[in-house]
Amino acid sequence: MAEIIWQREAPGLDPAVHAKVSAFLGKLREDDTAPGLHIEKINGADPLIRTGRVNQQWRALLVRVQGTDGPPHYIYLGTYNHDEAIALAKTHRVEINQTNGVAELIKASLQGTPPQRKTQAKPAAKPKPDDISTASWSRLEVQGITVEDLVGLGMRRSFAEAAFATTDDDGLQELADTVDGLWQGYAMLDLAFGASLDAVRERYSLDWTPSAGARTEDDLLKALRHPAARLEFAFLETDEDFQAAIEARDFGAWRTFLHPEQRDYATRRRSGSFRVTGGAGTGKTVVLLHRARHLARQNPDARIVLTTYNTTLADSLRDNLLLLDSTVQIAPDLGTSGVYVAGVDAIARRVLASTNALGLPLRDAVQTVLGPRGTNILGMTGDETWVRAAKSAPTGALPEGLLTPAFLEAEYATSVLPHRVLDARGYARVPRRGRGVALNRAERNDLWTVVEGYRSFASLGGTTSFEEKAAVAAAALELGASRGGKQVADHVLVDEAQDLSPSRLLLLRALVAPGPDDLFLAEDAQQRIYGQKVVLAHYGIKISGRSRRLTLNYRTTAENLAFALRVLDGGDFEDLDGDITEKAGYRSARRGPTPELIEASGKLDEYARAATRLKRWIDDGDTPDELGVLVRSTRDVDTLLESIRSFGVPVQAVANRERPPAAKVALMTMHRAKGMEFRRVIMLGMAAGARPSSAALPEADQADAMQRQRSLIYVAATRARDELVVMWSGRRSSLVPSVKGEPPS
Ligand SMILES: Nc1ncnc2c1ncn2[C@@H]1O[C@H](COP(=O)(O)OP(=O)(O)OP(=O)(O)O)[C@@H](O)[C@H]1O
């Protein structure tokens, strides 16, 4: 039995050869001495280099590493036709970096010839980091880094010097893409975009000291397992790992090659609740999926809950978890072994529907949260109930703005339910932290009569809202545990945590007993498009000191990312810990075209232009399901669909609970697009005044609603991997930032 180590840049092959390589590697894993494999040394090559015979024409390029104990390991470097494989065998080798002990693939033909760039005469004043792409200073220099700093970390001097001679972002990226030792490119870009030397040393574990003396194959195996080496080398220890690597194409790298920080967050034991933050596309969901698999592999009996704020996203988490590892056990029900994947409201419903089986005191929980009423609570309270309650209550003290369903719902979700307020006296004392609008005693009294009306209408109908279901389920679990019952989960993993309301957070908190590895949350405050700002600690989730930020964007090109980040300008973003979220340091690993802004002459022109663009992309080779059309509201969707179809483009509108169609362009609202990604995206309807009903909110809440609008557009713009087109007719929204080359407005 041999073990395969996959090298990230091993080139992909056309399907016919791919199947043969897969069979070859399968045989190699079973028995590397099988004569048919022709594993051979090559004269003039590094002693560890081998080639293997895939078939008459093709040879696999390998590095054989045999530790003192254990099976032989083969690093797979790709499959080439016979002559090319022999030539590459003489130039390639895997070495241990003598400064930090990281294994690196060295392609000798490229050695000593890093792309050389001309240093231009420098301007007198040092530019700020943000102005750098137009100045002739190296970003590194502006950050106060020296060539010696880079060399001290273990980077090759020729590479460090070339990085200092490079004054534009494209050049830096190109340099990072071509350097031997993938970590060197990543770390150099991190520094150029503002990370400190200490942060980079820690991020890539560069303080390891390699063992002195001659390189042994044991040392090499150790160096291949170094966290920074695992950016480019993956040990395929199980059949599932092997299968995932073999199948991984373009966007499958997330399954095999984690950034060292992602690996750390996915696997390290935590003494309590942990939070990973990061901008859109920085790989938070990927961390969560790997962590779910890791926990399930570590303890097959563990009851793991993987959740997010709605069912659509939960479905996609389940699909991707199974794509990562088809053998992960999906738990059939809450409280059973394996990974239970569901939206948070579905979890609340499940708890409430199974209180008998779980031994939870439903009656007491209902009384604790809603006061005296029956346990018939599974029906859904309609949105109009707030309007009815407001109309039938004496509300003389309240201004109009405080009687809108939006305000009442927000007040109820934030100030009433999580504090389990049952009467006017309780409501008068409630802290109302984070609510924009101050309320005097008379206003509170009147508001409470509206809440009482709302509750009695719902009680009569035997209904509750989603918020109430979550609050009652949380209380049932808490009461159950306080009376000696057992929690229903051992680990709870949460995606898109920024969109969860207090009651939902209380529910997740109550699913698992406080302790090591209890809750793990992925969140991005900049993507909060629902609900109010919340602070985790207020709901029993203590993460102080256990929060980390991801900054490398894997999804979006630098151009789209810069555009999306500019949408956020004009607002600070508070995260779930009450801190202002930093935008600094976010960067992308990919480049692409500048987002295109198109002003149409009217709605129909906008639709026709969108349709023409989709047609062109498909004619140029895109498959329809790589393309997304995002709209702000579902008004006029039928006209838009018709227009797109009239150009012969297959398209389907995707409603909230539906999965995107295969082989068709997906048309959906920006809200629905959360968590998704497409190769190319068209955002439509970006005219001024197209904002939703925030005008119905009191002034203080309008600011928060505006923030959510910015976030929504940020979310939409970051769904595009390669290309983004933004359209409007009429006056352009002030939320659409300008792009490079556009005349100032
Ligand atoms: N280590 C990795 N190697 C390659 N691709 C990666 C890696 N990590 C993440 N990706 C890819 O980057 C994209 C974004 O990842 P992911 O969805 O996890 O980000 P996110 O932070 O959850 O984004 P969002 O907040 O926008 O939903 C995906 O296409 C994912 O496959």
Image (cartoon, rainbow, N blue to C red):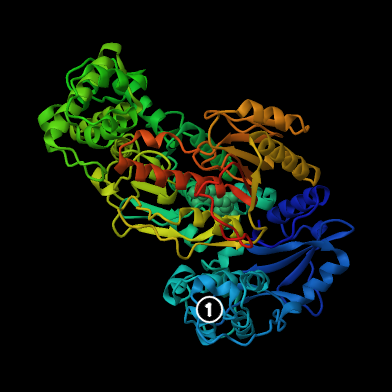
Horizontal and vertical percent position of residue 376: 28, 15
Horizontal and vertical percent position of residue 716: 54, 45
Q: Is residue 87 left or right of residue 727?
A: right
**Element marked by disc 1:** helix
Residue at figure coordinates x 73%, y 78% from the top left: 110
Residue at figure coordinates x 79%, y 66% from the top left: 51
Mark 1 residue crowding within 10 angstroms, few (<14) / some (14–19) / many (20+): many
Residue at figure coordinates x 14%, y 29% from the top left: 445
Q: Is residue 213 left or right of residue 437?
A: right
Q: The C terminus lies in which quarter of the figure?
A: bottom right
Horizontal and vertical percent position of residue 666: 64, 35
Looking at the picture, which amino acid does disc 1 mark?
Leu
Q: Nearer the viewer, residue 335 or 277?
A: 277
Q: Residue 486: in sight, yes or no?
A: no
Residue at figure coordinates x 48%, y 54% from the top left: 279
Q: Nearer the viewer, residue 217 or 172?
A: 172
Q: Is residue 495 left or right of residue 102?
A: left
**Which of the 4 quarters of the picture holds residue 595?**
bottom right
When the figure is inspected, residue 549 is found, relative to residue 421, above or below; the finding is below
Q: The N terminus lies in which quarter of the figure?
A: bottom right
When the figure is inspected, residue 733 is found, relative to residue 407, above or below; the finding is below
Q: Nearer the viewer, residue 161 or 412?
A: 412
| Number of marks in the rendered image | 1
When the figure is inspected, residue 43 is found, relative to residue 186, above or below; the finding is below
Q: Which residue sits furthest right?
A: 56
Query: Circle 1 is placed at which residue position?
Result: 140
When the figure is inspected, residue 391 is found, relative to residue 71, above or below; the finding is above
Horizontal and vertical percent position of residue 567: 50, 53
Q: Which residue sits furthest top?
A: 460
Q: Residue 627: in sight, yes or no?
A: yes
